[in-house]
Amino acid sequence: MASEFDFLSLLPQASFGGIPFPWREYGVKGGLRFHPHEYPHRPGAEVEALGRKPYEITFSGDWHAGMRGWESFFPGQAIALRRLCETEQTLPLVIPDIGTLQCKAVEWPYKIDAKKRSGQSFELKFIEDASAAFVIGNLLSISMSGMTTQLAAITLAANEVGYDTDNLDTLIDAVGTLQSFDGIDDVVATALEAACLAVIAACISLEQDPFLDDPSAFLLMDAIHEIWDTTLTINADALRKATPLLTYDTPRLMTITEVALDIYRGDTTRVVELLQLNAVDNALAIPPGKLLRYYAPLRTAQAA
């Protein structure tokens, strides 16, 4: 009988501001800002999407002196972590199954139980700070940092089902080439796109392997799809980096949909992108004279 697939062992340690910490469980809350447009004598509503809400992340568990693998954490590092939370800084938070997000700590309560005298129960609450989340260089680095873990998941899943790991060499080499772009400030979009396409081609080739049609290879196929999806994200980010960022001055009181219609000549599909790029208090009532950043339409970008 094959051993149980241990997903958690592949994940990086949780940390905030460079301070790793143990946890028992964590949750990530995501959501969508929206406005339902309701009309008399019509059932239901037309729901207008107004962008993604910031992620809210909560870690909880117990910190005790002498914990296995964390012998030096409590109380010294635990105190240092709380003091870091008090600084109000936006710092990198490593969420094991997601990667790194720029976040602020907003709550850090703890409890001490007289029956458990060696430590305390804790809770750490964070909220995503999107002020720097859409700098393309950061997005590329965040996406690429998770690919090593994804490759490890593919290799482990291949071993679980007895798949010949030599067949993964092309994918491993392609990912290595793609990761070599990480940290380069002026990445040539065409070169990065070529590296992405090489990874995607390797994933397609593996997907067509008859061995992976067997239900027992589900975890391996799923892991391949994960790294495929990450590569698609990196490629999309690279294309946006090559697109000029322009400024729009609202001429009157406008909704974000009206702004998109004006900028993109009747196209409202980029409303969410506009909300991601700009801090807007009320997407349904943007005041005149508000400067909004936006990616240039395709023809303008090509002309530049």
Image: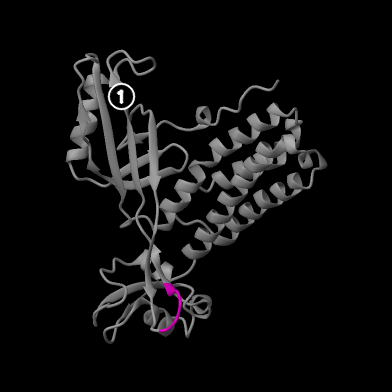
Q: Nearer the viewer, residue 2 or 79?
A: 2
Q: Main secondary structure of the magenta part?
A: loop
Question: Is 43 contained in the magenta span?
Answer: yes
Describe residue 85's horizontal placement relative to residue 225 as left or right. Answer: left
Q: Is residue 227 visible?
A: yes
Query: How many numbered callouts?
Result: 1
Q: Is residue 183 visible?
A: no
Magenta segment range? 41-47
The kind of secondary structure element at disc 1 is strand
Describe residue 31's horizontal placement relative to residue 242 as left or right. Answer: left
Q: Position of residue 119 (x, y in %)?
A: 24, 18
Image point (33%, 56%), residue name: 130
Image point (55%, 44%), residue name: 179
In the displayed structure, 44 sits above or below 88; it is: below
Residue pointed to by mark 1: 62
Q: Nearer the viewer, residue 180 or 43?
A: 43
Question: Is 258 contained in the magenta span?
Answer: no
Amino acid under label 1?
Asp
Image point (65%, 49%), residue name: 199
